[in-house]
Image (cartoon, grey):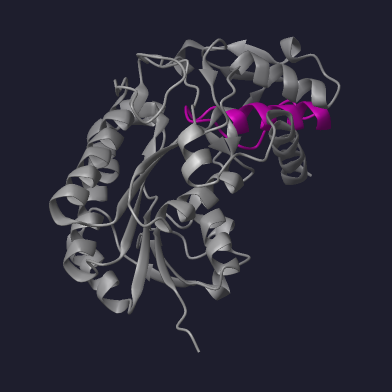
Amino acid sequence: MARKRVALITGITGQDGSYLAEFLLSKGYDVYGIVRKTSHFLYANIAHIQHRLNIIQADLLDPVSLASALTLIKGLGEVYNLASQSSPAESFRQPVHTAEITGIGAQRVMETVRDIHPKARFYQASSSEMFGWVKEIPQNEDTPFNPANPYAAAKLYAHNIARIYRKSYGMHISCGILFNHESPRRGLGFVTQKVTYAVACAKLGIKNSEHLNEEGDLIMKNGKVALGNLDAKRDWGFAGDYVKSMWLMLQQRIPDDYVIGTGETHTIKDLCKKAFSYVGLDWKNYIEVDKRFIRPTETGPLVADYSKAKRSLGWQPKTKFSDLVAMLVDANIARLK
């Protein structure tokens, strides 16, 4: 009988980590996940599969804990580094912490894998935010990076270190340059969730929400949701589609970097229109612009040219923008009910 394949996911309790864990379990993997000691014992995104996972405590700030965790895992074949401080807006408030977790933290994981499981294949979660103040549209693997926030700069550090380790040490490291990907498991601080949560409140007649935004105010306050730049453009896809691309990258004989996205761009205003019209409401009655939510530096327009992934991995997105918005609205209505 063939031995089970073994994978480790950092950031397993997050949106991408939970979808990837489900995907790997469906492929028959033994799945290990790293969580911080400070994390709560119950993890909402993985609660339904937690009994099938091997959860290990470690911290990307602590190389000793990482070494202890990786020593416990026998026959480790694949490592997916998804852990990070993942909010560009928050990275302006906590720039050094973001650099430590998202940049240096990724290198700590790579270095520990190089030391203990050097033959393991490694996936590094890179980000379209690295393109920042874009130099060309759309963006592909050869587009110059030009980060516009501390999160993007930290991601670019990790991305470059991954490429250096790949060339210098012969490690099988692939980087997925993922454009915005959303799901009902996304935190409420992200704009897609904030908008669709507000839609759910409006539909259910909730003027003042129980959940708070990143500034500590009610997300829905006196029947309005506060947003930043409505003209910002993003390439939004479904996280459940994107995790398959991560796995496909590690099945290739030669490691490489791949842009993953939909190739379509929408403004936040488009998102608002689509979400509110889904429940028969006029978005203009529920939105207000608040300068606190306008980034010091705006990026974009970010739009993916994913032709390499389509050609080399056989990957393409399945979920349409309108279906994604409907999924998020329905999930938030269910949450509030």
Q: x, y (%) of residue 220?
A: 66, 26
Image position of 188 with respect to 83: above or below: above
Looking at the image, residue 138 lies above or below residue 328: above
Residue 295 visible in the current orientation: yes
The range drawn in magenta is 192-217
Q: What residue appears at the point 22 percent right and 38 percent down from the top-left corner?
A: 160
Please tell me whether residue 127 belongs to the stretch shown in magenta.
no
**Quadrant in the rendering for residue 9:** bottom left
Task: Classify residue 178 as left or right of residue 196.
Answer: left
Quadrant containing the C terminus is top right
Task: Answer above or below: position of 247 versus 202.
Answer: below
Residue positioned most to the right: 280
- Position of residue 71 relative to residue 256, above or below, is below
**Residue depicted at 56% across the width and 75% down the height:** 51
Q: In terms of depth relative to the viewer, which is nearer, 170 or 88? A: 170
Q: How many marks?
A: 0
Query: Where's residue 161, x and y in %?
Result: 20, 43
Residue 35 pos. (x, y %): 39, 61
Please report the residue visible at 28 percent of the width from the left and 56 percent of the height from the top. Answer: 172
Left or right? Give the position of 210 relative to 137: right
Along the line of sight, which residue is nearer the eye, 187 or 273?
A: 273
Residue 218 in view: no
**For residue 178, what is the image quadrant?**
top left
- Left/right placement of residue 130 relative to residue 278 reads left
Specify the farthest residue to the bottom. 1
Residue 299 in percent (x, y) is at 41, 17
Residue at 23% over, 53% down: 61
321 to the left or right of 316: right
